[in-house]
Amino acid sequence: MTFNLESYIPRLKACRDYFAKVYPVSDLIDDLLFADLAISQHHLPEKLPKLLLDDAMITEIQDFLAKQITPGMTELAIQQKVRPAEVLDELLADFRDYLIEKYGMFAYISKDWTQDLLAYLDGRRVVELMAGNGFLTAGIRELKMDYPITATDNFDWQIMAHPIAPITKVIRMEASAAIEYYFKETDVFLLAWSPQHANSDWLILNYLRAHDFFVHSRELIVIGEKNGVTNSKKFWQQAQLSVPTALNKNWPQFDLVKDQVFSVR
């Protein structure tokens, strides 16, 4: 079944009702519903577990379904009993698509991770590039209202089918212009989930190198999947990457996307 934005949460809630007494499964669904509720209210969600039905869950589901199927049931009736498990598996795989289409949240910004980021930044002045509708910056501001962080974006994404208003103040500015404008007063540039089919990330890195940005603890932090669904091929080929433990211990990898938090030079 193809992904449908409007039916996603109702279908998830229906699975929650059906598997209410299969507690590991209903708990997993609750994690998604609570995350959705937090994001809808512009609050930081909790870190997510892996969104998959592990062997123990599958065994419990099989035991549950065995009790629903009685002798003499038609094939159609049996399929109706089994189908919710198949639907749930599809919904778990589609959660990131739901967040992207519903909220414009590409990188999942959780409360635990944002606390780690705030400690790592240690008061340094920050500019977020290509901030989208501002989830990362909003997370920092939720934890520390007066933190010196500025979000910038050119708002090209607002041509999407379901345009979404930023959830915090985001200044309309191209990334290249933002780097030049804020260069002298910025200690850290943040870049999360840069598009895969554009070289803007490489141009950013090249500009920072050419202007000796990486001195005196100044830093470019990038969130993305190396050689995967984010950032340009040239960026991954040319960037000097490190993976700070402090920024990755709570970074939620909840699906097949293996994004990480990189310190880049």
Image: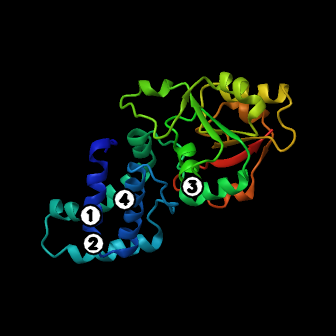
**Residue labelled with disc 4:** 33
Q: Secondary structure at mark 3?
A: helix
Q: Give the distance between the C-alpha atoms of the residues marked 4 and 1, in whole angstroms.
A: 22 Å
* Secondary structure beneath label 1: helix
Q: Is residue 21 visible?
A: yes
- Looking at numbered disc 3 in the image, what kind of residue is underneath it? Leu
Mark 1 and mark 3 in contact? Answer it, CB < 8 Å. no
Q: Position of residue 25 (x, y in %)?
A: 38, 69
Image quadrant where one finds the N terminus: top left
Q: Residue at x 26, y 53 (%)?
A: 10
Q: Count neighbours of disc 4 (C-alpha within 10 A) and say few if under 14, some if 14 to 19, many if 20 or more.
A: some
Q: Earlier in the sequence, mark 4 or mark 3?
A: 4
Residue identifier under label 2:
65
Label 4 to label 2: alpha-carbon separation? 23 Å
Marker disc for residue 143: 3
Numbered circles on residues, count: 4
Going by the numbered disc 1, the residue's amino acid type is: Val
Q: Residues within 10 Å of mark 2 (few under 14, many from 20)?
A: some
Q: Secondary structure at mark 4?
A: helix
Q: Is residue 111 above or below residue 187?
A: below
Between label 4 and label 2, give the one nearer the viewer.
4
State the residue position of label 1: 82
Are dots 2 and 1 in contact, CB under 8 Å? yes
Separation of marks 4 and 3 at Cα, in angstroms: 22 Å
